[in-house]
Amino acid sequence: MGRVVVEVMPKPEILDPQGKAVVGALPRLGFTQFSGVRQGKRFELEVDGEVTPEILAAAREAAATLLSNPVIEDVVSVSDAAAVPGEASGTPVSA
């Protein structure tokens, strides 16, 4: 079974109240290194079999027409999860 990962972010000119809330909370929790936060969305699309160029093209089309709102969001990434370090098994990349 293959998996495609789609990442969507608000356009830079769009206000991000969730990101502002997070950036305000970080210093209160001792994380003073960060000066900005933008919160986006991540979708994981499962497919039977391997992820092919045709499947990636279909995922890009789905991302542009359904998974994102093109007025306020940009699709920033559509990729084969197996090509992303730590993603093939669903295991997060450790810090």
Image (cartoon, rainbow, N blue to C red):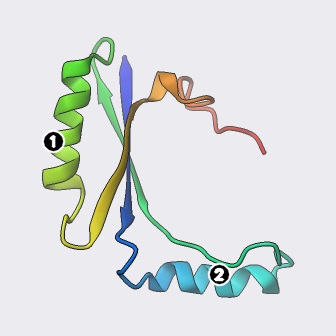
The spot of residue 67 in percent (x, y) is: 23, 54
> Which sits earlier in the primary sequence, circle 1 or circle 2?
2
**Residue 27: x and y, percent?**
79, 83
Q: In this view, does 73 lie to the left or right of 19?
A: left
Indicate the quadrant where residue 36 lies. Answer: bottom right
Snapshot quadrant of residue 15: bottom left
Point out residue 81 in the picture as x, y percentages from the top left corner. Answer: 46, 29
Q: Is mark 2 on a helix, strand or loop?
A: helix
* Residue with the mark numbered 2: 23
Relative vertical location of residue 66 with respect to residue 20 in this rendering, above or below? above
- Give the residue drawn at x 70%, y 84%: 25
Q: Compared to 95, does 82 lie above or below?
A: above
> Residue shown at 65%/81% (left/top)?
23
Q: Position of residue 43 (x, y in %)?
A: 36, 47
Q: Is residue 37 left or right of residue 33?
A: left
Residue 61 image label: 1
Tell me how far mark 1 sits from mark 2, CA to CA.
32 Å
Assign a secondary structure to mark 1. helix
In the image, 29 versus 35, the foreground residue is 35
Q: Residue at coordinates 68% horizontally, 38% vertically from top-left? A: 93
In the rendered image, the quadrant that contains the N terminus is top left
Q: In this view, does 3 lie to the left or right of 57?
A: right
Amino acid type of the residue that numbered disc 2 sits on in the rendered structure: Val
- Marker disc for residue 46: none
